[in-house]
Amino acid sequence: MPKDTTQDGFVVFDRVQKSYDGEILVVKDLNLSIGKGEFLTMLGPSGSGKTTCLMMLAGFETATHGEILLDGNPINNIPPHKRGIGMVFQNYALFPHMTVAENLAFPLEVRKLDKSVREEKVKRALDMVQMGDFGGRRPAQLSGGQQQRVALARALVFEPELVLMDEPLGALDKQLREHMQFEITNLAHDLGITTVYVTHDQTEALTMSDRVAVFDDGRIQQLAPPDKLYEEPENSFVAQFIGENNTLSGVVETIDGDACTVKLDSGEIIDAKPVNVSAPGDRTLVSIRPERVEFNKERLMEGVHTLKAEVLEFIYMGDIFRTRLRVAGHDDFVVKTRNAPDQARLKPGEQIEIGWLPQDCRALDA
Amino acid sequence: MSGLPPYASTGQKAWYYSFRVICGLIFFFLIAPIVVIIPLSFNAQDFFTFTPEMLALKPEGYSLKHYEDFMTSHDWQSSLWNSVRIAPMATFLSVSFGTLAAIGLSQPHVPFRRAIMAILISPMIVPLIISAAGMYFFYSRIGLQGTYWGVVLAHAALGIPFVIITVTATLVGFDRSLTRAAANMGADPVTTFFRVQMPLILPGVISGALFAFITSFDEVVVVLFVGSAGQKTLPWQMFTGLREQISPTILAVATILVVLSIMLLTTLELLRRRSERLRGLSPG
């Protein structure tokens, strides 16, 4: 569950900036506080600065400006090997010349633990990821999923309080990935470790995290729990990046507290909820999720504005129907409907009217 | 015919066979001068030619006297001892410095990497006689000329390029996230080097070491300039032997060196296979 972490974060990025060449900032003024035991995901397209943030936390990159605190202590001047942070790498980074057990024993050996203690901990860690019988194998003799588990066990075997994961599931096939998402989340919560997870896969971010930080252009665009992120995106980048989304551009016509009307570029008027528009006349992109669009006249709310639409394509996807419409001059407007017995199956060429609840249509920055 | 498709034209057939003949000739040209030395070294006479007894394969045409001479002659034994003292030390220095240089130069943030690499490799490209003359004048100035350490350092300089090249080649396939992973797990840079990086680049290091060793063990030009009578190495003794004595003992020594080289190259090949296996093992 998300906690209030603004005051006493376990990991704190305080006005952190990073530039590789001294001119272009890859990370611009990052402020982030991660609570103890929290599972936080850094999500963003490649080049958005998320991996750089992770590398700064691990100590492989240094912040150009600002401070990173771990458990209240600044760690800018602590080398990676003294930070005591566990990490799972994108390509697992298992040592090919060591067996699985030797890989796991490595962090314990450098900590000069006794042999008996080492063996005990290695065994426990391998059992934890259901790899107990594989201690004698070499990494190359394991499948991708098994290597992934070993990498996870190796990052956890020395009981770090903070574990970083850099797109650890990227190389796995879909089914295994979904299974591992579940396992990693459970493991992290059971052990109570703080996890910072980097991915560009929004499904992963939504299903695994307590909170998600959406990165773009070196900044956090929105930091919120998954449901809030999906249902209440704060700007058009987040709306576009998370899930499927229909956008229409226009100008704010009237604002009245929690409701506004927008005049689309094609002339129609629609209802929306103002999010980051402030006054009539502002340019705006309105965002509506495909599953929140209604075209059944009986279910439409009284008095709301509707738009005329023409059905262009109807795609049967099994559990849902995906209908592509031409709306207000855009021919990429998508509506998703559940495959229910009473659900209408629209045909290309049909003329319909669509509408939505005003709070589902968010007027964002243009 | 095995290698020829049924539709091969006459021209293709002719080329198919002449290609094999040409390959055989090249092979013969390369190997014959070396192979011919081996039977000659068992010559019972003090000649560099095959005697009629040898050609008739009579036992009295053959003897081990040249080997005996090599084993007992003071000149040969002291030169062997000198080579054995110089080559391993030169190899050790080449490997230490060459490996460190290769690792340093594989870091992306090092400025002027290509220029530094070119300078370090230059002893391999510059004609040996020029390096040798340069070293002679330089070492004379700083008092290294004619000393054991002078020859060792000169040979180390000649061996370093081989080590740099072989180790750099191994490092190309080296996954940097492995050292990061080691650091992350609490290993300091020295531990990381010996426990993670070194075992994985070891085949390259050993190949380089073998090349460096052979360079020093075979080298005659530089040692003539930089060394003095106290550093007379095996190749130097062979050179003087050829000029002054014309004794077939040289052939016995040459045979021993050929056998040694074959053994070293076999080791090299076995290591290369091991390295390939390890590369195949590395993830990603």
Image (cartoon, rainbow, N blue to C red):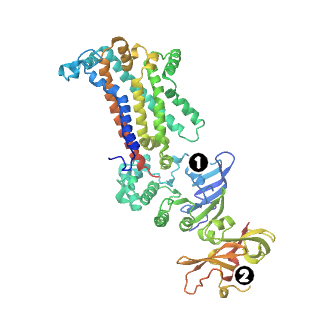
Camera-nearest residue between A94 and A226: A94
- Looking at the picture, which amino acid does disc 1 mark? Glu
| Res B68 quadrant in image | top left
User: Subunit of mark 1?
Assistant: A
Name the amino acid, label 2.
Answer: Thr
Query: Do we see residue B62 in this rendering?
Result: no
SS at badge 2 = loop
Q: Residue at coordinates 29% horizontally, 25% vertically from top-left?
A: B38
Are callouts 1 and 2 both on one chain?
A: yes
The answer to whether B206 is drawn above or below residue A61 in the figure is above
Q: Name the residue tied to disc 1.
A: A61
| Mark sitting on residue A306 | 2
Residue B46: image location, x then y, percent: 27, 14
Q: Position of residue A57 (x, y in %)?
A: 57, 52
Left or right placement of residue A101 versus residue B124 in this view = left
Q: Quadrant of the rendered structure where residue A274 is?
A: bottom right
- Which residue is at a point 47% across and 16% down the rendered structure image? B145
